[in-house]
Image (cartoon, helix red, strand yellow):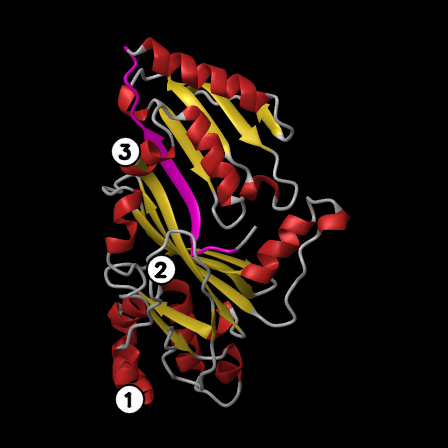
Amino acid sequence: MGTSPIDKVYATVPVDTTNAAHIKQIKVAFKVIMQIEGFKPTKKNDYEVSLSSNNNTYGKDGDMLLQYGPNSHEHNNYLRFVVNPSKNHVGVFRKLVAMIVPGGYDVFINKAKLNRFDYTFDIHGLSLNDLLMSYPRMGINRVFRKVKLLETLEMGTDPKKIVAYDKNAHLKHLNKKLNPVIHHVISDHAVTRIEVRHYRKVTYGFKEVHLQPNPFEKLTLMLYPNSCCMKGEDPTWHMFIDLCRQKGIDRALECQICCFFRWKFFRGFGQKAVFTASVALATELFHSRSITGHATKGETICIW
């Protein structure tokens, strides 16, 4: 079990439904997998047969889903797989795929169509409440707080969404549902998880993943500790910074009431405001990377 910059994968595989041998292989494989400890049938209205794994370490967030026979009778999506590479053993997944897919794992890698693909990285030592975020033509559209502190920010909508959240809070939530013996260890420092989620309109397969543009290249992260707003700052400036946290830097600067702050913003932060934070994508599909952030007020965080 290891960590991965790929947090979740949804993939479908076309199958020639006129080939009786292929259909028989799939059905036999599902019957065999159903006997494996941890797998059980689950009801999903969109597919004839669905099996899910019971991930005792991560709960539902780590469950694997295997499906065949779409109710739409669409042969291009005949097989469907949902897996989180960072929470499942890749070797086990490969063996399951080799059993199910006619032609084995190579056919899966070459012909699978990606329906959702999540890229991730972690920022250690920095809280979500101390960051300002910006992405071209995207604003923050959902905010979740707990006791006035940010826990989750969501930017954009389908087919592309950026999500930032308090990783420690997420693990605490998981721990409430898990056996105490396998509880996750909560870090003694802040950890912020950033995810770029691609939905539906993913037009490439596994072999092209490493050829895609860096999904974090246009993301700007700026450090502005929440405590700075509380000590000697102009209350209206405090409101502006809070708007940046709630709506994103771009939308905050576009607001008519904030025209005055544009000059102060760029004067205070300098051209660093337009720097981008990027994380290098691994050329291998399953590879681990995280970063430790150290910055001063107003400094753009350089990632990788």
The location of residue 11, given as percent across then percent down, is 36, 35
Q: Nearer the viewer, residue 78 or 268?
A: 78
- CA neighbours of label 2 inside 10 A, class few (<14), some (14 to 19), many (20+): some
Labels 3, 1: front one: 3
Distance from Cα at disc 2 to Cα at disc 3: 21 Å
Picture residue at 40% right of the left edge, 72% below the top:
132
Residue 288 sits inside the magenta stretch: no
Helix, strand, or loop for circle 2? loop
Question: On the picture, is 221 further left or further right than 95?
Answer: left
Dot placed on the residue nearer the N-terminal end, 1 or 2 = 1
Label pair 3/1, CB-CB below 8 angstroms? no
Residue 11 sits inside the magenta stretch: yes
The residue stretch that appears in magenta: 3-18
- CA neighbours of label 3 inside 10 A, class few (<14), some (14 to 19), many (20+): some
Disc 1 marks which residue?
Answer: 267
Disc 3 marks which residue?
Answer: 111
Quadrant of the rendered image containing residue 138: bottom left
Helix, strand, or loop for circle 1? helix
